[in-house]
Amino acid sequence: MISIDSRIEDTRMRSYLRLYLVLGSGNCEGDPAAVVEDAVRGGVTIVQFREKGANALKTPAKKELAMRIQSVCRRHGIPFLVNDDVELALALNADGVHVGQNDEQAAQVRDRIGNKILGVSVHSAAEALLAEEQGADYLGVGPIYSTASKEDALEPQGTAIIQRLTEITSLPIVGIGGITAERAPHVIRAGADGIAVISAITHAEDRYQAAKMLVSRITDSITWNFA
C-alpha cells in the first residue's frame, strides 16, 4: 500500500504519472500479471486495472486478476489503481480509482475513497476545471492520437489540448491515446507530466524493453523541457 498524506503531494503525483500502464485481460495475449511484472521492471511507475469491454471478466475472476496485478505493484512499490469500480478498489484497499466522464461523479468518488488517489479522464477545459474542483489528484487527457485500445474512444485532439490545460489548471497531467515511443516526446514537450499507454507495452514482443524505451524517451524529453 502506497503511503498517502491528506492529498498526494504535487511532486510525488507527477513522478507517479511518468509512465502509466493501463490494462485488463482484453489487452493482453498472455497473463496480465506477467505483463505488469515485465513492464514495471522496465520502468512503469503506476498501473491502472481497467477491465471493460464485451469480454471483460466478471467477479470473482475479475477480483482474482486484480489481486494478482496489485500484488506485483506492491512488491515493486508502485501505485495500483482501479478503473471505475469503486467497490472493487475499496475491497482490495487499492491505492486509488480512475474515473471517466461517463462513470460515477468525481466528487462522489472522492467522498467514498477518502485520501486515496483520484484520477479523472477529461477532454476539455470545462471538464478539467470541474475535476479539479471535485477533488481530482491528476487528469488523464486524451485521446491525444487515434487509438484502437478503447472501444468508446473519442476523436483524437492532438497535443494542443495538453498545452491548453496547463494554462488553466495546476493539476498533474498524463496524456493518453495512441502514444508510442516516437510520439512520447511530443506529449511531454506539450506539458504533460507523463504518458499513459496500453498497446505500446501490452502488444510489444518484449514488454520489458518496450517500457525501457518509453522511459528513455520521456526522460530525454523532460531534460529537453528544462534545457
Image (tube, rainbow, N blue to C red):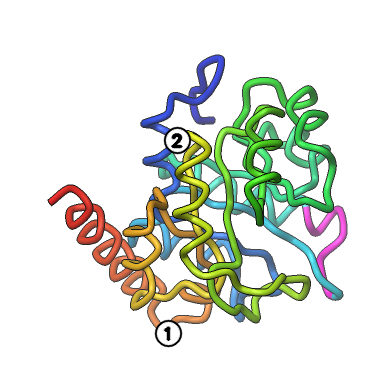
Give the quarter of the image for residue 43: bottom left
Counting labels gives 2
Q: Main secondary structure of the magenta part?
A: loop
Is residue 95 depicted above or below 23 in this figure? above
Identified at 61% across, 81% down, the residue is 29
Q: Residue furthest left?
A: 227
Please report the bounds of the magenta region as a residue range: 55-62
Q: Residue furthest top?
A: 6
Give the quarter of the image for residue 206: bottom left
Identified at 47% across, 72% down, the residue is 179
Residue 72 point in image, percent of width and height: 51, 50
Is 59 in the magenta?
yes
Q: Nearer the viewer, residue 16 or 223?
A: 223
What crowding class fits label 2: few (fewer than 14 Cα within 10 Å), some (14-19), or many (20 or more)? Answer: some
Is residue 70 depicted above or below 184 in this figure? above
Q: Earlier in the sequence, mark 1 or mark 2?
A: 2
Whether residue 93 sits left or right of residue 151 in the image: it is: left
Instruction: Give the CA distance from mark 1 to mark 2.
Output: 30 Å
Q: Nearer the viewer, residue 134 or 54?
A: 134
Residue 41 point in image, percent of width and height: 35, 58
Provide the residue designation for mark 1.
205
Q: Nearer the viewer, residue 194 or 43?
A: 194
The amino acid type of the residue labelled 1 equals Glu
Provide the residue designation for mark 2.
13
Please tell me whether mark 1 or mark 2 is closer to you in this view: 2
Q: Are marks 1 and 2 in contact (CB under 8 Å)?
A: no
Identified at 61% across, 78% down, the residue is 147
The amino acid type of the residue labelled 2 equals Met
Is 76 in the magenta?
no
Is residue 146 depicted above or below 89 in this figure? below
Residue 40 point in image, percent of width and height: 41, 56
